[in-house]
Amino acid sequence: MFAQLSACGGSAESDAKKRIEPVYDKKSGRLTLLKYDANGNGKVDTWSYMDGARVVRIEIDKDEDGKIDRWEYYGPDQKIEKVGLSRANDGKEDAWSYFNADETLARTELSTKRDGKVDRVEYYDKNILTRAEEDTDGDGKIDKWETYDGTRLASVAFDTTHRGTPDRRLVYGADGSAHLEIDAKGDGHFAPLKIQK
């Protein structure tokens, strides 16, 4: 960061240094935290937790309301491993996004009850949601599966018997129609529900 600012001129480098406050461990002298005023308004809005020169985690309060909006977690290779978010914008981390090597979104894990336990996972291909799995009753087992066709919800399957596989599936047509299918044997073969008259 400082090398880039040096190339811009002495005043830019000086301004940046004024906006960064390093914090060191009192015993070891090792860098543990960088406090940063990203927009230069005199208020710290970014905290980089350090292990010497290595970034461990960055917390950002972009709207400066005193609550963290974004958490960035870094691996030993200094590449971002995941990004935490507060969906309610209240400073409570309840969603975590993971990325592919090409920096496209791979999956998002959500704590829908906001208790820190992941109960929904959404999977992406080229930043487009393709499927999701959810534990709707909190027993630690997936009981709801969603599949998507582009931006359209194509089907939702449910495990109503707690056997670990879906036994009911709603299939949605591109025209907005829907029909129910059942897997009575639990072997992965769904058949349309026949209504008795």
Image: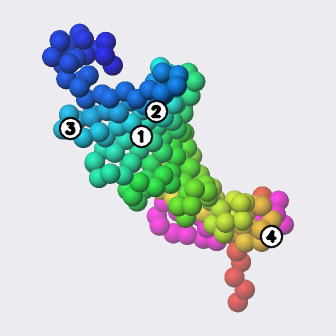
Residue 145 occupies quadrant: bottom right
Q: Are marks 1 and 2 in contact (CB under 8 Å)?
A: yes
- Quarter containing the N terminus: top left
Amino acid on which disc 1 is placed: Glu
Residue 184 numbered mark, or none: 4
Residue 42 numbered mark, or none: 3
**Residue 127 visible in the shown view:** no
Mark 3 vs mark 4: give the one in front. 3
Residue 59 numbered mark, or none: 1
Say which residue appears at 45% left-offset and 48% top-offset. 85
Mark 4 vs mark 2: give the one in front. 2
Q: CA distance from mark 1 to mark 2?
A: 8 Å
Between residues 127 and 46, which one lies in front from this camera angle? 46
Could you classify mark 4 by the number of other residues whose Cα lies within 10 Å: few (under 14), some (14-19), or many (20 or more)? few
Magenta stretch containing residue 176, yes or no? yes
Badge 1 or badge 3: first in the primary sequence: 3
Q: CA distance from mark 4 to mark 2?
A: 53 Å
Label 4, secondary structure: give it: loop
Could you classify mark 3 by the number of other residues whose Cα lies within 10 Å: few (under 14), some (14-19), or many (20 or more)? few
Left or right side of 63 for 103? right
Residue 49 numbered mark, or none: 2
The boundaries of the magenta stretch are 170-187
